[in-house]
Amino acid sequence: MKLTKGCAYKYIIFTVLILANILYDNKKRCMIKKNLRISSCGIISRLLKSNSNYNSFNKNYNFTSAISELQFSNFWNLDILQKDIFSNIHNNKNKPQSYIIHKRLMSEKGDNNNNNHQNNNGNDNKKRLGSVVNNEENTCSDKRMKPFEEGHGITQVDKMNNNSDHLQQNGVMNLNSNNVENNNNNNSVVVKKNEPKIHYRKDYKPSGFIINNVTLNINIHDNETIVRSVLDMDISKHNVGEDLVFDGVGLKINEISINNKKLVEGEEYTYDNEFLTIFSKFVPKSKFAFSSEVIIHPETNYALTGLYKSKNIIVSQCEATGFRRITFFIDRPDMMAKYDVTVTADKEKYPVLLSNGDKVNEFEIPGGRHGARFNDPHLKPCYLFAVVAGDLKHLSATYITKYTKKKVELYVFSEEKYVSKLQWALECLKKSMAFDEDYFGLEYDLSRLNLVAVSDFNVGAMENKGLNIFNANSLLASKKNSIDFSYARILTVVGHEYFHNYTGNRVTLRDWFQLTLKEGLTVHRENLFSEEMTKTVTTRLSHVDLLRSVQFLEDSSPLSHPIRPESYVSMENFYTTTVYDKGSEVMRMYLTILGEEYYKKGFDIYIKKNDGNTATCEDFNYAMEQAYKMKKADNSANLNQYLLWFSQSGTPHVSFKYNYDAEKKQYSIHVNQYTKPDENQKEKKPLFIPISVGLINPENGKEMISQTTLELTKESDTFVFNNIAVKPIPSLFRGFSAPVYIEDNLTDEERILLLKYDSDAFVRYNSCTNIYMKQILMNYNEFLKAKNEKLESFNLTPVNAQFIDAIKYLLEDPHADAGFKSYIVSLPQDRYIINFVSNLDTDVLADTKEYIYKQIGDKLNDVYYKMFKSLEAKADDLTYFNDESHVDFDQMNMRTLRNTLLSLLSKAQYPNILNEIIEHSKSPYPSNWLTSLSVSAYFDKYFELYDKTYKLSKDDELLLQEWLKTVSRSDRKDIYEILKKLENEVLKDSKNPNDIRAVYLPFTNNLRRFHDISGKGYKLIAEVITKTDKFNPMVATQLCEPFKLWNKLDTKRQELMLNEMNTMLQEPNISNNLKEYLLRLTNKL
């Protein structure tokens, strides 16, 4: 049948629209509209393709785009639609740029858009089949009537972000009902640019389908990977006769079938590069097998989500939504199944094949190929699936479990050249397994556990069941080629991923809103482990420092959110310090409230009740509540109020007042809590806040009572202590018992006494911090006033002499922890200070810090130098290098202290310090010679040490990244030229996330240089973000971290930062994740 461009086209369109209107049924509107739209568009497309004039007509007017826009519209008024579509056909010369073909309308299998996309990938390796845009869901489509689900084009964060390129790059634009509006002025359909789709926790609904078993065959070739999947499925009790919708992003379909019957595209199913929809009438009413065969391209997947290639290793990353980039699946965490996986590949290129569970078979394939089959007997969500193929070497060990005496084979893998760096990771794994048995009574449940290091990884590591995959910097270390911090990082990250085996894997999440249930809880478990393994007070202080300098800032920014968000656009943007680090403190407070004995009982209840199932934060609170009832011996006791920690954003302020009645020997502490309202929560309720306290005798510095924990459950309360002989000094929030701002209302003299004599490291550290903050804020205001009023002279406040004496006292105390000494000689981090200053002038803050350092240094530089020299023998003892399986954290802390003192002496231009710097650069410890490079920034020997240390670093990938970080944070006026030099000579065109982060993120912590009033620092980072977003949106969003503080800055800098963020938002192909992040950050979402 032939059609002309005139009346016949109008007739077909108008007829379809009339049919659509007649069949529209309010009760089943989504299903009817969608099926009709698809079939109608399929009819039109076939009619057009049968017409000889179709191609020439399509050149003049993009006919299918008009239908595409209409099919997504909320408007079904025939008068308007008839007028719009026909006026645009006759006036196609002025059609909007956005009228472009939408893939879902191409009804023939292997449609033109898919072919174009594939060809484009062949020409431009930055665009790839495995990384396509995340179209937002049509709000009226029953593809995803449950908007909370990870089925909306949301992909995998460090721990994940959107890793897709826009379809618009390949001639395809997302059109949904939210993005189409009627414009009465010009009688045309106007497409609004990709507005975010918001998902709400309250809309959770179980899936209408069940996947019981998954059989995967992954066939790896040089230029493509073929994935065949068989899903044993059933209908759930929640099914209401809906279509069967699978997530699947950028998959090239070879075959789709149900019960071995091939399905026909356009008639029985549709695929729009994001969702595969099988119409309900073709879905069996009971158990059935869904099969698919697809082609993917890991070799060109630079977004590093799904299946991708890192150097010569094929590796997967599926959390949160990467599995849909490998094969079709109902990609949500409550869809748990058992997996049977076969991997085949070239044996020479990929001699090692790994996947989840136990290896049950290996086999040879003619033509130099081989394969392996793996079976995981445990139910798991698809985000825990993993596969690795490569030329890998390993270290191994056997571990015997504590209770069942089961033998577990442990393997840690890397490239051959790094295999000697695996020993510490293997030791950490054994330590982790023993700790989980000893503290929590949990044993490993498989016969083998594999850990693999890869160079290209967006986050720190991934806890895939039985196959943990790590960023190389979180698994590899050697004492001659790694900084000290690497050992602490490996200890915590290996522990974190192992502990996920129960808190995350065996007990997983009902939905992604519950993320803190696995991440906050597991960070808490990791922190307990690292504190036990290192036995140093600074381990806990480092956790507190991170929270107060990074998370507190996030809580006071436009990005503030509860540890369990109520809504999101892209889930990957909620892998945040709030969910992880504040979440861990919320989990830790249960331990503070209950004590170790009852906490373990509650934890045991949680695991036993939920093992093998999904869970919510309420499930964990319920288990802890049972233990709380036991402790109180009161069945009416409850923790209902505690749940507010999961739903309420912001950081509480807790303030204190005191009263001592000498006659009654009674001491009272009056406590008040307050959380500042924000845009999302106008009213904040009182939280359940545990306050661990002690009372210190001011006459001798000794404890007057045993430590106790007060339970603040009201806005204000008073706690009375009896039989107190003298007026005490309160020791508050011991161990940092709650994540709050502490307004202690103590004098400097009282704080100094606590700093010197309190038994709790946090209270001593916090007392020191409060004294520093008082000095900073007073002098900052004076500097600012002088600058604004152009004063030639002004009154600065000298640093408290007693405080300086206290620092000296502690430095000279042979029993004081070396790491703790590093903290007390250092001012609080800039990001912590910023929380207490509005309209911050960063130059003035830098001046203030320099003044305070000079004030203290003038009195203590000789003490610093003496200590720097006295620690050399112990800190740099060469026997440290003898055993890679043993790490002395006390010795590391001594080196940290020496390097901190060298930095202070260098800033002060202490006599002869340059010679010490040069001598320090000869140390065999990388931490030492990198510090010599860092502090040489104040001298003219900088580039001499720059060249020397580069030669020491350049042949080791991870050590080179540490060198890049050191250079990036250099406090030099020519840092912009240095960064350009790094870009051109070292970074080049690297797409490795570690390289990119190493070059740019340390620079953003430089108060003077990043915040230069010209705005060139902001512009530099914004350009890097935009460039990175083209191939890896997740890393691009990570680079936005320094823009969080824009609303804390002075007016000029706020304007400069906002301009750069708005410029990024105007990028035509900005990724969904970066767009959401910037919209939220600038209060536009």
Image (cartoon, helix red, strand yellow):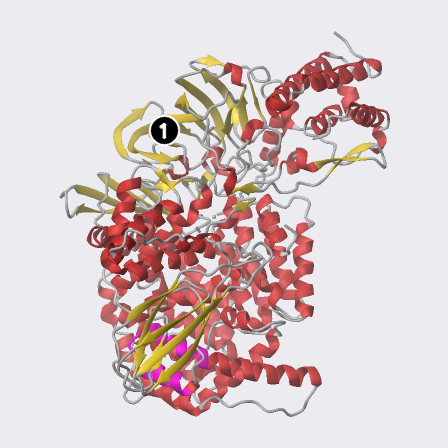
Q: Residue 92 appears in which quarter of the rendering? A: top right
Q: Look at the image and give the residue range highlighted in magenta.
A: 749-771
Graded by Cα atoms within 10 Å as few (under 14), some (14 to 19) or many (20 or more), the crowding at tag 1 reads many
Q: Return the x and y of residue 112 as percentages of the image width and height.
A: 64, 24
Q: Is residue 303 visible?
A: yes
> How many marks can you see?
1
| Quadrant occupied by the N terminus | top right
Does residue 200 appear to the left or right of 412 in the view shown? right
Q: Return the x and y of residue 597 as percentages of the image width and height.
A: 22, 57
Extreme-front residue of the structure? 664
Amino acid tagged 1: Thr
Q: Residue 188 appears in which quarter of the rendering? A: top right
Please tell me whether the stretch drawn in magenta is mainly helix, strand or loop. helix
Viewer-side residue, 583 vs 895:
583
Q: Is residue 989 visible?
A: no
Q: Return the x and y of residue 509 as percentages of the image width and height.
A: 39, 41
Mark 1 secondary-structure assignment? strand
Q: Is residue 836 above or below residue 175?
A: below
Does residue 892 appear to the left or right of 114 in the view shown? left
Viewer-side residue, 91 vs 237:
237
- Please give the name of the residue rendered at 74% of the width and 32% of the height, measured from the top-left corner: 99
Q: Return the x and y of residue 786 as percentages of the image width and height.
A: 65, 86
Does residue 69 appear to the left or right of 286 in the view shown? right
The answer to whether residue 987 is magenta is no
Extreme-top residue of the structure? 1
Viewer-side residue, 312 vs 771:
771
Q: Say which residue label 1 marks.
A: 344
